[in-house]
Amino acid sequence: MFKEDVAPAYAAFLAENFSEKQIISDLPFYQKMAKGWEKPVEGVLLPTFALQVLGDPHAFDRGRRGRGLLEKIIQAQLGEEGTLEDFNVYPDQLYNFAMTANLLDTPLTYDIIALPDIDQIALTEKIKVYLHENSGVTTALASKFSDRAFVCTGGQVNLATKKLIKRLLANSCQLYYSGDLDQSGIKIADNLLLEFPEIHLLNMDLKTYKEHYQASVPPVKDKQIKEVENPDLQEVLTEIQKKKRVIFEEAIHEFL
């Protein structure tokens, strides 16, 4: 009856990872976790998702059994490199603000937008907006080009920034993204394009990597990525892995 009530893919996942004895020993837990099998359509904060699935906002905290099973579910669906963010679940509520420059009627540096305000704040229509992974690059470019609007993603794109991106696209804005030419940076860009294919890449192709190879350095630490979906990003990822050298956005931002 349990197998008939849950999604076949979830039942198959459990059968592959757990014995019948394990499942039967805590059947209510595995029944509730069936609601965590489907990737949320919209981004959701981790405590909210935990409350929806298991009825406890702390059920997906680190070290809890629910968190362990959720991570297995994500890896089963998205691969070993899959993260909570890739699954549209965001663990850090304090980090959910959007960093912008020259986009709003506020001082040049950073306009801090609280998460609840993203859907209400007035935004300009039909403009070009430049997204950068690095805050230092964003600051330097915003100071140099006061007529351009910028958004800093600060690495992995958080929920607030995604909500802002969605609104900018709805306002017919053209968005351009640039980040580090290392494996982690390529993965961040690929994830962003999977969710927002309308975004254009700047200086994140094989041509750029080869042109500015003199600015490359050996990676001190870089996540090992097997592959990405975007063919242009896959090309440069392959070259990075072959050369074992990376180019940080700070080294080539003058060419943007």
Image (spheres, rainbow, N blue to C red):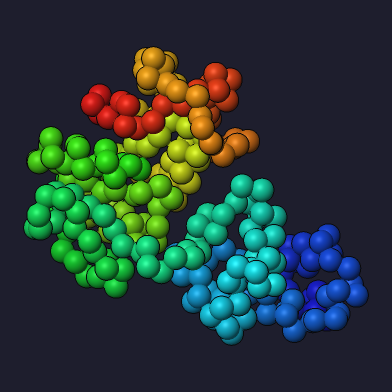
* Rendered residue at 50%/24% (across/down): 218
x, y percent for residue 252: 30, 26
Relative image position of residue 118 (x, y in whole percent):
27, 66
Q: Quadrant of the N terminus?
A: bottom right
Instruction: From this view, report whether residue 194 is shown above or below residue 244.
Output: below
Q: Residue furthest front?
A: 220
Name the residue located 80 percent from the left edge and 81 percent from the top edge: 26
Nearer to us in this view, 191 or 108:
108
Question: Would residue 225 be found to the left or right of residue 10 on screen?
Answer: left
Q: How many dots with numbers?
A: 0
Q: Position of residue 37 (x, y in %)?
A: 65, 67
User: Is any atom of residue 233 visible in this view?
Assistant: no
Which of the 4 image quadrants contains residue 251? Answer: top left
Comparing 96 with 189, the one in front is: 96
Query: Is 86 situated above or below 32?
Result: above
Residue 96: where, in percent of width, then height?
36, 64
In the rendered view, would you say 235 is above or below 13?
above
Q: In terms of image quadrants, where is residue 248?
A: top left
Q: Is residue 152 left or right of residue 155?
A: left
Q: Where is the C terminus found, in terms of image quarters?
A: top left
Left or right side of 205 for 34? right
- Residue at point 43% right, 50% down? 156
Task: Look at the picture and state if 237 lies above or below 98.
Answer: above
Q: Is residue 137 something that shows in the picture?
A: yes
**Residue at left 27%, top 41%?**
136
Q: Quadrant of residue 74?
A: bottom right
